Amino acid sequence: MRSMGRTITLQLALFTFTSAAAAAAAPSAYHIDDSAGPARPFHGIGGLSGGGATSVLLPSYPEPQRSTILDLLFKPNYGAALQILKVEIGGDAQSTDGAESSHMHDPWATPDFTRGYEWFLMKEAKARNPEIKLYGLPWAFPQWVSCAPGTLHDCTGNAYDRPQQTADYITSWVRGAKEVHGLDIDYLGCWNERAYNKSYMEVLRRTLDSAGYRNTKLIANDNDFPSVAKDVNSDPAFAAALWGLGAHYPNMVSGPDAEKTGMPLWASEEDSTYNNAVGAGCWARVLNQNFVRGNMSASINWNLIAAYQKGTNWWRAGLMTAFQPWSGAFGSLAMIWATAHTTQFTRVGNFSYLANGTGPGTGSGLLALGGSYVTLQDFGTGEFTVVIEKMSRDHSPCCRPALADFSVATETATFTLTGAPAKVASLYLWRTHWAFGAPGDATSEFEQQPAVSVVGGKFTLTIEPDSMYTLTTLPGGAKGAFPASPPVAPFPTAFTDDFESCAPGSEAMFWSDQNGIFECQPPNPSDPAHGVVMRQMVPLVPIAWGGDNRPHTIIGSRDLVDTSFSVDVRLTEPNGSVTLGARLGCPAATKCAYGDYYGALFSFDVAGHWNLTGSTAGVQRSPAQASGALGSPLGVGAWHRFRLDVNGTRASVWVDNMPVPGAQGLNVAFAGSSGFAALGTVQFGHFTEFDNVALYSTATACSAAWPEAGMAVKAVSCASEVGPRPGARFTFMPLNQSECTLGSPCNGVHGAFALVANASLSLCIAVDKGGVGKEWPLVLRPCVTGEPTQVFRQQYAHLYDSKIVHVESGRFVALPAPDVGSPAVVRAQNASGTFVFVGDEAEIVSINEYSVTDTGGHLVVISGVSAA
């Protein structure tokens, strides 16, 4: 709980937060003193593309928007100016938001280093910043690395059982980067968030060295510090194979064993938080405090860019958002500008951190009234940069791990400069402040301020809560200017693609592989009627990281309702199959993660047998809802035209313009009301080909009734990717709830909900105390500042586990059931209910107009919300 003037100390892992009341007695005086020399080299701030398919839609973006997005991520003195790009080494398997292609689907074919989009991304990053560091990490592996050499037999399913084979596979990826794309891979990891193997890492080190890649450094274990640090400290051979240690979401703590190794310590995956200003606050806090509290010299954000479909896993957890290549819309830049405070004024290889502490010989530490500061200095030139953050607790929690309570307050701080820093007469100043809707306040991101004078070796700065500051000797910072984003738009109601513009080895435009890989293949001279086709490429079930479902790829949006979906299909082997799907998505209160979608999926085999299942799970876990057979077999090698229509709760299928017997007007109410379209196969090793896709659709719509005062707030499925439809009610809307799969406490959780509103209104959610028993209904009322029935507080702000609390009663906002149409109520403290407090949850750029302050705020519809 929050300190109310009492001295209180809260333990968080290995460090403490002290309340503002206790710290107020300490003088706000700090040192920037380089006399102790560099504390640790600065290794950079980065973004992670992958884990998985988080950048999949970016290559489909039109120009000039695609170049603008890439500039915002990588161009020096423009936007985030990232210093590290970490990418997934594709393994053909679902790895969070989709699957990424391996360069070797099987052991005998020539490796193909044109597959996927990470090569494109790395080259674009290097073109903008030749000094950017590249880091590769596998999430999954093709099954063959565990098989008898050169075969797909005697497979163990463990990537470490044949360590030389796996090491050769990873080394070939490094070789392809260099020889085909001219890219030097600076760092490699072992296996994302899975048990590492010391023998394998030692074999990989020797294999890289023998191949001439001694400069490619190994980082372990891309999971946690304690386990790998213990082995490094006790095993010299293992230690010799490694360069550094990397942990995911380390909670700003490395620990004594990690420190003892003497190796560089990295937060090699960090943040994963919804990218509004709260997500930026999380990022700002850990960028500094990972060093101040944990001596970590690099932090890498998962993910680089939220360029994956809404309705997949971990929505909008990127440094920015770009999920609509059909509209060209992009935005959500708060985290870009938080990153710029460090990256635009430092250089990897030149800058080092000054030591942590508060006395002479230090230059980094905690602020007396909450927050932190770090100093990075180039000891060759004397140039230095000071980055300060003072993020409040409610505006800086990361999605994980849990954040202890603490307080911040405005302070006037005096910094005493000693050594080379004392030689300067003034410092350039950049400031960011997030207002979070506070009355009379305004957000300002990465704006240059008047220079700060250094007088008598000292400067003074007033540091405000929810703000970042950079003071630097370097003049080069800049906030890039670019055309405004186009407005968001629904997925096209009529979409066709013959794949002729798709480069071999690439994914087709707007598609997102969820398991298995669907690549464009060059024309077959023996089949002139079909040029470029899309083909399922993976021969065996991969060694997966997450998700166990049939090969499938999705297109469209989660808003598609009634669809007519047609495609040419060719089965290429006697045991082949094809699957067509509609309304793939996640019904409320249903666990839906790692590509395991629910929907209406029709599958056919060569003999012409068909079945209807309700999810993309394997056949054993998804029993048939209906089945039947065609009048004749489909056969091998012939093309057939398939069509799946879904209207209302009924579905019908045609093959070669003939209705499929038994598959007309089938009830598919189990599939939900909207979702993606999909293509796939029943099993891996089915190399089915697709061509000439046509998708016609309608999208979700809302109630025609305009909201009025007194209207009850209910759960209705009426929002879309472009915001509520005209006439939308102010409602709770079900969202994808998948956090439970990651081990979070989920007892009693009904699902995640977002507040959805029509932007032309000015009504507030209010508590109706006249409710029956312990449940108070939520209704719409005219907004009244300070009205106790309308004041709520966001208890924990991230995508999956954000509680909204009515301040006066302390009760949680909750729903008694996840069903559409359920009334929203305020319940007692022990009530379940997980919410995302986002106003128009579909708005792509800024949802901060709806965030609450420390003291509470209205759940209010604000007019004039813009998507650009």
Image: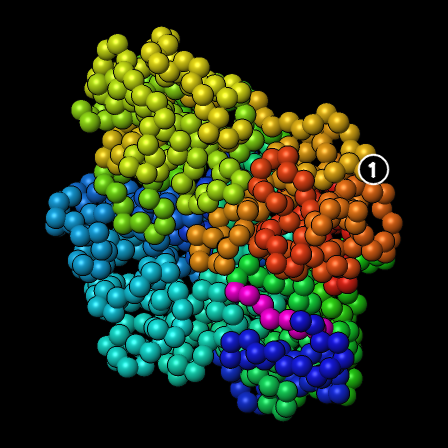
Q: Position of residue 695 (x, y in %)?
A: 48, 21
Quarter of the figure that contains the N terminus: bottom right
Q: How is the protein colored in the picture?
A: rainbow
Q: What residue do we see at 31% from left, 55% from top?
A: 174
Q: What residue do we see at 44% from left, 52% from top?
A: 741
In the rendered view, tell whether residue 219 sits above or below residue 68.
below
Q: What residue do we see at 53% from left, 52% from top?
A: 748
| Helix, strand or loop: magenta stretch | loop
Name the kind of residue labelled 1 in the image: Ala
Q: Position of residue 422 (x, y in %)?
A: 68, 85
The reply to whether the magenta stretch includes residue 192 is: no
Q: Position of residue 771 (x, y in %)?
A: 75, 46
Residue 256 sits in quarter: bottom left
Element carrying mark 1: loop
In the rendered view, tell whether residue 39 sits above or below residue 91.
below
- Name the side, left or right, on which 159 lies relative to 34: left
Residue furthest out toward the top: 658
Q: What residue do we see at 54% from left, 28% from top?
A: 673
In the rendered view, tell whether residue 532 sits above or below residue 307.
above
Magenta region, residue range: 401-408
- Name the side, left or right, on which 650 lies relative to 206: right
Q: Position of residue 459 (x, y in %)?
A: 76, 81
Visible in this render: residue 38? yes
Pointer 1 residue: 709
